Image (cartoon, rainbow, N blue to C red):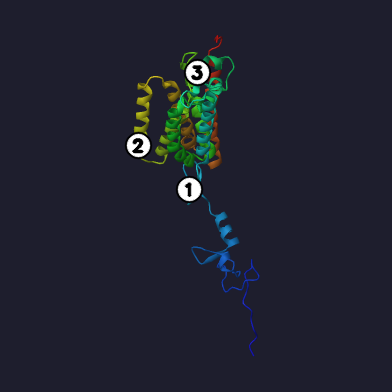
Amino acid sequence: MDQYQPAPTCFRHPDRPTGLACTRCGRPSCPECLTAAAVGQHCVECYQQGRDQVRPVRNAAGVATGQQRPQPYVTWALIAINVLVFAVTAVQAHSVMDNQRSQLFFDWVLIPGFVGEGEWWRAVGSGFLHYGILHLAVNMFALYVLGPYCEIALGRVRFLAVYLVSLLGGSAATVLFSSELTASAGASGAIYGLFGAVAIVMLRTRQNLTQILVLLLINLVITFSVPGISIWGHLGGLLAGTVATVGILYLPTWLKARDLRTASIIGWVTVATVALIEVLLIVLTAPTGVVY
């Protein structure tokens, strides 16, 4: 008489009989615990082990890429901060068109003479202020278009660093070349820095630069032709963002970095150097002795 042989059970679910098994380790597994592989099907542990052993594909900036498109959370956060700051100024001024009359606007707007008297926070805070709802909408639309592409290409932390360095570059150029009581505000310096960053990313990945260069040219024409626009703020941001991105994407190759860690260090040193130069320019060139 034949003896009854019970069906094997899943090694993760002992109460589930199964006729299936992992083709890698041979352990019996239920359908819920198996994942289709290139050859056969793998259990949870073998599937995870296989993923850990595969080196991730990285882009030119050393950022790991995968099938799932990452979300540009830093871009959304920057837009939210700009909108929030505008809302505060609009509430204080009781107007969305004349929000520059608010106390926060007066405390943060970039005035070189005030910076020279020790109000250094204006060099950063002014980059989150906007003259009216239209100014805010134009800059936030540009950030919405440029930010995600740049953030995915550079990675979140490096993207934020390039954005802030560009913002500070616009402030440094304004302090250096504008008159001591000129008031300026807006995220335009940072936005122009992203124009430069996107152009460098596209150049590094051998994409067609025609579209981004045409957009940049149009914006430069507007910068030089429309009165009241901070020319130096735009140019300073453009230069800072471009140089920082070149340091991230090209300088490691030029210096023949041997691994990703060395390349990352070179990129961060470049960004830090650009930021240090900007701070020194602001500290050393901001006018002092201004009466107000």
Name the residue type under label 1.
Answer: Arg
Precedes in sequence: disc 3 or disc 1 = 1
Q: Check if mark 3's residue and mark 2's residue have beta carbons within 8 Å.
A: no
Name the residue type under label 2.
Answer: Gln
Q: Is residue 118 above or below residue 157?
A: above
Residue of label 2: 211
Q: Quadrant of residue 53?
A: bottom right
Query: Along the horizontal axis of the image, is 52 left or right of 134?
Result: right
Name the residue type under label 3.
Answer: Val
- Mark 3: few/some/many CA within 10 Å (<14, 14-19, 20+): many
At 51% across and 16% down in the image, what residue appears? 112
Q: Position of residue 30 (x, y in %)?
A: 58, 69
- Mark 2: few/some/many CA within 10 Å (<14, 14-19, 20+): few
Q: Residue furthest front?
A: 94
Task: Give the number of the disc on residue 69.
Answer: 1
Mark 3 element type: helix
Q: Residue furthest bottom?
A: 1
Marks 3/2: CA distance? Answer: 32 Å
Q: Position of residue 258 (x, y in %)?
A: 52, 41
Q: Position of residue 203 (x, y in %)?
A: 40, 37
Does the image show residue 94?
A: yes
Q: Check if mark 3's residue and mark 1's residue have beta carbons within 8 Å.
A: no
Mark 1 element type: loop
Residue of label 3: 175
Q: Nearer the viewer, residue 269 or 27?
A: 27
Query: Along the horizontal axis of the image, is 270 left or right of 28?
Result: left
